[in-house]
Image (cartoon, coloured by chain):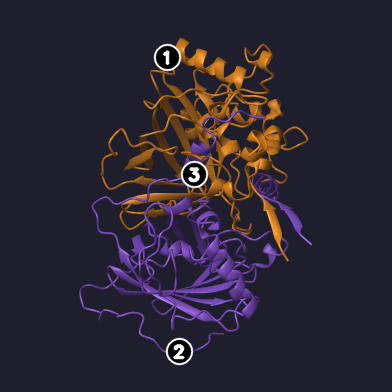
Amino acid sequence: MRGIYITGMALVFASSVAFAAGQATPPARAVAQPRPATTGNQMPRAADGKPDLSGIWQALNSAAWDIQDHNASLARNLGVPPGKGVVEGNEIPYKPEALAQKKKNFEKRDTDDPGFAACYLPGVPRATYMPYPFEIIQNPQMVGIRYQFARAVRTIDLTGHSREWLEGWPDFWMGDSRGKWEGDTLVVDVRKLDERTWFDHAGNFHTENLHVVERYTPIDRDHIQYEATIEDPGVFTRPWKISMPLYRILDKNAEIFEWDCRFDQDTEKYKDAVPK
Amino acid sequence: MKKHVIVGAAVAAAVSVLLTLPVGAQGRQGRAGGSSPQTAAQNVSQRAATIKRLPDGTPDIRGTWVRVGGGMNEANPPESELKAFGVLSEPQGFGQGVVTAGPEGGKIQAKGPKYMPNPRPPAGIVDPADRKLPYTPEARAKRMDYAKNMCCPAKSLQYLELSVRCAPPQPWAGGGVHVFQRPNEIAMLFEQNHQTRVIYTDGRAHPSPGMVFFGGHSTGHWEGNDLIVDTTNLDGRAYYGVGNTFAPYSRQLHITERFTVQSDKLITFVMTYEDPQTFTRPVKVAGFLYPQDPDEELAPEFSCHEGSYQLQNIFGF
């Protein structure tokens, strides 16, 4: 049975009125080479004493194409760069039927990847390792993230706002994020993620029960260690983890520019079309 | 179990009609009355209590705000030259997006927002005084061409209203706005269509003029309690409700905004639109921001492309 939800502007319209009204232990594998912290080169601190992660960051890997170890392959014009995966132990613990679905997804990745093929909001954690920059901007009560890809945005509430009101709402492409500081690590709990995003171009997928816990830990001024624990009992037999460093973009006056690639795709697709 | 979420434009059309139908309500939103922005702002500032400040002395405007006004709703006389084309209301322009009109014809809010200022500062077109947009002949011709060909169906893709295509509504988008503030930038994360805007306050220059964005590129600086923002690099296309007309901006459009922090609970602003290809004189639009009630929930995601079948429905593929 497929439920039909109507959201978007209608939802916002309604909501505007209304407003006015356990971690597993995966096999050990050294996926990162943390740089030793050096004095004088530490992450700046905000006025509240927390690490100030504000800045423009980017993952430098090929996980957006495949989060597991992968060879080069041809896709579209250029293809997929070869690369080491970001999954600890390299294994994704799919249930057998889910693994079959992943293989089907893989076969249709050039047309069905909601990220690279459709330019849809990439979801979490994929937004982090799309091969484009993103900006973290931090307030004491909220962390905002602006991703270049698909103009994706997240707001991470740090105040402990209740989530109960979200019951009954449709899921969100970028999920609902709530954060807290554990020492110098920003821990973000992400739920209500829409089932239609993929983890990568290789068709790794999840259900609407996906639960992601992200950890952003400063390495030094220009590097953050990123970790995400992924849980989805509908698809996986146990939680699993990805990790990677994030690199600060140091280019002068770097900016996250507006890029609506879906709009551009539509412009090309319908440029000579006549309304029916 | 699969859920289908029909998001955005498919529904946006219906909602936009709702938004555009209550002409009276939109008139209310844009009504500036006889008072000048300065007078009203002074009245407000006399009541102003405190202004929080950052360590560098600038007003601290971090937090979640609700915007009123800023739209280019014209006075909307019944003899509108666009009436012949079935156009329901006048263009709303870059300031479009405040979702205020209800299906019953336009009560502004279901319940009174906690921090809505009383009296309300001006909102809408404040100059020219007659609230009619001073189009150049070329712009007026372009606008009429658009009105003739946009509906229904639109003649072609280029006549399709941009909200139907989930174009970024900018530089202002509707709904609540989360404001982040650092010495080098002020970032605004909007509820509507996950739009964002950054105002760089580090003295950087605009990109080369050939780089254009729906939201343009904004730089700013503080003058006391006023934040002066300069926006260029605009795409020239703007975002209107279905049934509205195309305000034919050019890429020469230059927007200057003056935000005045009146208190912790009120920011007033005046936007000046200059585009010699479109307007014979600058147009000034006023509005204000008040804090969202902290007891209210934060706005959820507003996606658009992801659930939209609007283009498929229009073109049949």
Q: Chain of mark 1?
A: B
Is any part of residue B58 visible from this angle?
no
Q: Position of residue A65 (x, y in %)?
A: 43, 64
Secondary element under disc 3, as helix, strand or loop, is loop
What residue sits 67% from the left and 41% below the top?
B10
Q: Nearer the viewer, mark 1 or mark 2?
A: 2
Up-down relation of residue A80 to residue A101 (above or below): above
Q: Which residue is mark 2?
A: A27
What residue sits 61% from the left and 17% below the top?
B148
Label 3: few (<14), some (14–19) or many (≥20) C-alpha neighbours in 10 Å: some
Q: Colour of chain B?
A: orange
Q: How many marks?
A: 3
Q: Colour of chain A?
A: purple
3D distance between C-alphas at marks 1 and 2: 70 Å
What residue sits 71% from the left and 62% below the top?
B2
Q: Which residue is mark 1?
A: B280
Q: Chain of mark 2?
A: A
Secondary element under disc 1, as helix, strand or loop, is loop
Q: Position of residue B143 (x, y in %)?
A: 53, 18
Camera-side residue: B288 or A132? A132
Is any part of residue A165 visible from this angle?
yes
Q: Chain of mark 3?
A: B
Per the rendering, the mark at residue B48 is 3
Is there CB contact under 8 Å for labels 1 and 2?
Answer: no
* Discs 3 and 2 carry the same chain letter: no
Image quadrant holding the N terminus of chain B, namely: bottom right
Secondary element under disc 2, as helix, strand or loop, is loop
3D distance between C-alphas at marks 3 and 2: 61 Å
Image quadrant holding the C terminus of chain B, namely: top right
Up-down relation of residue B65 to residue B165 (above or below): below
Camera-side residue: A106 or B226? A106
**Is B182 situated left or right of B48 in this image?**
left
